[in-house]
């Protein structure tokens, strides 16, 4: 009797709770939950991959910009060197003409001083003018070139 009673109680419990159906529903619920979790994980991984690729694109873009800037700076430096050389050549061409102008003005001064100061003697004035000319010539050579292009 005891066995029979236990069996009846178990059947009652199974029938009341319908355990096989509950287990089936529980399995389905767990499967759906696992699928949702997998889907969420996949979405998160995809978002991370997208962020990484976006950051990689930004890094690539910034690297290209830096390379372009460096190339531009190198081109500017090269162009500045060429301009500096060109200006130095031009200033080299101008220096002889400026010394010629100084010499011509000195010659004019000599002529004026010789004609106005005939009583002092020609040799004395020539010697003075030559000394002045030599001083000016030395000053011109020793004078630092303060032109704007020398600051580059």
Image: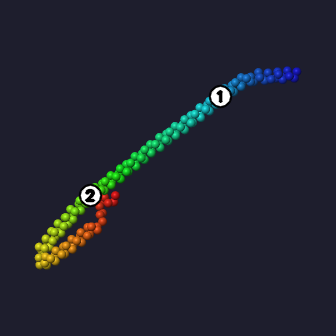
Image coords of residue 80 (percent x, y):
33, 54
Question: How dense is the environment of label 1, judged by Cα within 10 Å: few (below 14), some, or many (20 and up)?
Answer: few
Residue beneath the point at 29% across and 68% down:
142
In the rendering, at what x and y percent does residue 81 appear? 33, 55
Q: Quadrant of residue 116?
A: bottom left
Image depth: mark 2 or mark 1 in front: 2
Answer with the quarter of the image where residue 140 lies: bottom left
Tell me which numbered mark, 2 or 1, is placed earlier along the sequence.
1
| Residue drawn at point x = 73 percent, y = 23 percent | 20
Residue placed furthest toward the bottom = 120
**Which residue: 59% across, 35% down?**
41
Q: What element does badge 1 sit on?
A: helix
**Horizontal relation, residue 73 to residue 119: left or right:** right
What residue did someone put label 2 on?
89
**Residue for point 11% across, 73% down:** 115
Q: Which mark is residue 21?
A: none
Q: How is the image coloured?
A: rainbow
- 83 or 44, which lies in front? 83
Quadrant for residue 39, please give it: top right
Say left or right for 114 vs 45: left
Residue 93 relative to residue 27: left or right: left
- For the N terminus, the quadrant is top right
Give the residue pinned by disc 1.
31
Given residues 62 and 80, the one toward you in this image is 80
- Place of residue 26 in the rendered image (x, y in percent of width and height, measured from the top left): 69, 27
On screen, 5 above or below 33? above
Q: Residues within 10 Å of mark 2 (few under 14, many from 20)?
A: few
């Amino acid at each position: 009797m005891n066995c029979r009673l236990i069996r009846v109680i178990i059947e009652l419990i199974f029938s009341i709770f319908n355990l096989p159906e509950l287990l089936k529903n529980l399995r389905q619920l767990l499967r759906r939950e696992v699928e949702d979790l997998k889907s969420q994980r996949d979405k998160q991984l995809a978002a991370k991959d997208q962020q990484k690729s976006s950051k990689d694109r930004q890094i690539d873009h910034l690297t290209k910009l830096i390379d372009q800037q460096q190339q531009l700076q190198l081109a500017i430096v090269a162009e500045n060197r060429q301009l500096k050389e060109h200006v130095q050549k031009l200033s080299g061409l101008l220096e002889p003409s400026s010394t010629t102008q100084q010499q011509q003005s000195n010659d004019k001064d000599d002529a004026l001083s010789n004609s106005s100061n005939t009583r002092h003697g020609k040799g004395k004035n020539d010697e003075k003018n030559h000394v002045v000319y030599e001083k000016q010539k030395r000053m011109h050579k020793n004078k630092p070139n303060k032109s704007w292009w020398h600051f580059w």
